Amino acid sequence: MKMSRNFADLKSTDIDHRLNPSSILLVPVGAIEQHGPHLPLSVDLVIAETTVSRIIAERGEELDLWALPPIAISKSNEHVGFAGSLSLRAETLLALLDDLGSGIKETPIRKVVFVNGHGGNSSLLNVACRDLRVAHGLMTFLMHPFIPPDQGGHSPPSEMGMGIHGGYEETSVMLYLCPDLVDMNSALRNIPEKLGKNRYVRFGGTTSFGWLASDFGKYGHIGDPTGATREAGQELFAAALEFVGDQLEEVSKFSFL
Ligand SMILES: [Zn+2]
């Protein structure tokens, strides 16, 4: 029988002999926020949590990976005004992460990896990575199963590179992971074409900008989910797992000098 690699399944008395400084603690970071009329609020949580559980099943022993229960609700205030979106303030989330760091520091674990499913958290998680290093001496890392297109990630040309939220890729992945939660009859194209023609001020451009989902119409998603398929989702998710696995392999060998 395989031993659990969930941090929370350990007994307090196991901590010192099951964990060591080369153990890697994965913290799935999700979100509960609107994803348009065709997807559930839980998309980012499902993707972050499933990525962590599958990568631990595949490579947990080899890389000494451990899972923390997910941070399910995070910073989603770009979705304000859409029913069901829940959001922590930046200072609340930073305080939560600092408190977690205080506890983790008391274990042998020194490497903490945020596996982030929600692009709206990325800036703040980078701040937290630095702050946790300063305050608690932890080695901290941030990775994304899918790099958001507004942060250099991929989105098909059919979406003009702007499938940043509830578009082709996220919808395909959800059709693979949780088909019962996807309503393809409600899937529609919602692309800010004017923005897509800009050279600099666009998603993924050199000039970033503050935005709300409501700046792009009433639907909430930004992308084109209409062509999404389960098969595409399966391929995308397999590629994401390999990508995360490769990154974790490097984290496992990582030292500053
Ligand atoms: Zn999402």
Image (tube, rainbow, N blue to C red):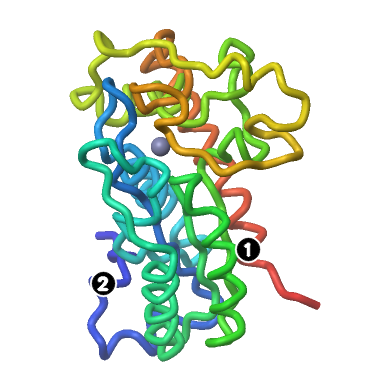
* Foreground residue among 210 and 174: 210
Mark found first going from the N terminus, 1 or 2 = 2
Q: Position of residue 56 (x, y in %)?
A: 41, 55
Q: Is residue 216 above or below residue 106?
A: above
Question: Residue drawn 53% across and 87% down?
Answer: 136
* Foreground residue among 237 and 122: 122
Residue at which label 2 appears: 8
**Displayed quadrant of residue 19:** bottom left
Q: Is residue 117 above or below residue 201?
A: below
Q: Quadrant of the C terminus?
A: bottom right
* Foreground residue among 56 and 2: 56
Question: Residue drawn 38% across and 49% down?
Answer: 76
Do the numbered discs 1 and 2 sit on residues whose CB atoms are within 8 Å? no
**Displayed quadrant of residue 137:** bottom right
Would residue 234 be visible to someone looking at this image? no
Amino acid marked by disc 2: Ala
How far is the residue under mark 1 from the one under mark 2?
A: 22 Å
Q: Position of residue 9 (x, y in %)?
A: 23, 71
Q: Position of residue 172 (x, y in %)?
A: 40, 21
* Foreground residue among 183 and 205: 205
Circle 1 Cα neighbour tier, 10 Å, few/some/many (<14 / 14–19 / ≥20): some
**SS assignment at label 2:** helix
Residue at which label 1 appears: 251
